[in-house]
Amino acid sequence: MCFFVNQWYLYIYTMNQIRTVSIIGAGNVAFHLARAFVENTIQVNQIYNRTLQQAQKIGEAHQIKYTDKISELVKSDLFVIAASDSAITELSLHIPFDDVMVVHTSGSIPMNALRGDYKKGVFYPLQTFSKGRNLEYDEIPIFIETEKSEDEKILFQFADRISNHVEIINSEQRAQLHLAAVWVCNFVNHMYYIGEKLTTDANLPFDYLKPLIEETAAKIKSLSPYDAQTGPAKRADHIVMQKHLELLQNQNFKDMYEKISKSIAEIYKNEL
């Protein structure tokens, strides 16, 4: 009797596993997810993208079938919509299967943007993705959410095959996390762009700043960003800040310098 009970539970467990995946989209996130899935021996049945050439690049790189016709979608256990935020709902309406799970990868879009009778969820890898970069996928945090509690374990186990850092959060928390990510990644990178432009305009190599960038990023592994802050705005060095403003020719850069300096000064005003 025990043997048959164990076999039954094994059968149920196997049935609930995600064994096959289809990816909808062919941008940077889709490119890296396809690579991550293949590297972790997850079967990717198909890549769909409305521009065939983009789907073809990913498909041929990883020996995955591809199509630009959404009517040709084949059935998989999991459909991952890795497309622009504005396209998620429209794409979700074209998945013709009701006994599958569908997730999107957006940080800012709620789970209820998915429309259909299938199981719904979110699979959000928190990282900046560029096609030319090799990433350690097991170190990328993946944040998941499911509509039904019984699907949570299934999606968690799937994500756990890829990453050592899988967390369950809701749509509101994910939106705040995505906002924070924009500050520490996209905005910081824009600061790198400004730094590069200023050094280039002065006939200096941007490489001079790279050790500073690396140390600034490394410090927050042992210090909080609050404790790691340095610079003229923190110490209220108005003479230096005025010289910087005089050097800046671009009015947008000048406005940003003033606003960021004001924000820093406000935070540390009681420490002077």
Image (cartoon, rainbow, N blue to C red):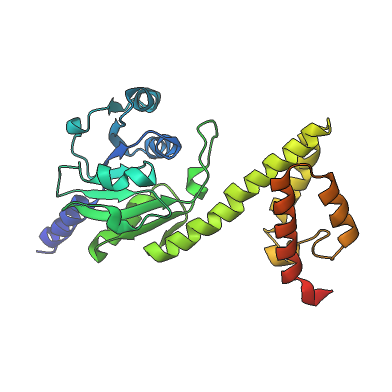
Q: Is residue 11 visible?
A: yes
Residue 83 position by quadrant = top left
Which residue is at a point 13% across and 57% down the rendered structure image?
A: 8
Above or below for 167 versus 29: below
36 vs 80, nearest the viewer: 80
Left or right of 176, for residue 247: right
User: Residue 272 in the image: x percent, y percent?
Assistant: 84, 74
Q: Is residue 169 visible?
A: no
Left or right of 191, for residue 115: left
User: Residue 60 in the image: x percent, y percent?
Assistant: 36, 22
Above or below for 83 versus 203: below
Which residue is at a point 33% across and 26% down the rendered structure image?
A: 51
Residue 68 position by quadrant = top left
User: Residue 42 in the image: x percent, y percent?
Assistant: 33, 39
Above or below for 234 versus 39: below
Residue 150 position by quadrant = bottom left
User: Residue 143 in the image: x percent, y percent?
Assistant: 42, 57
Left or right of 214, for residue 19: left
Left or right of 229, for residue 25: left
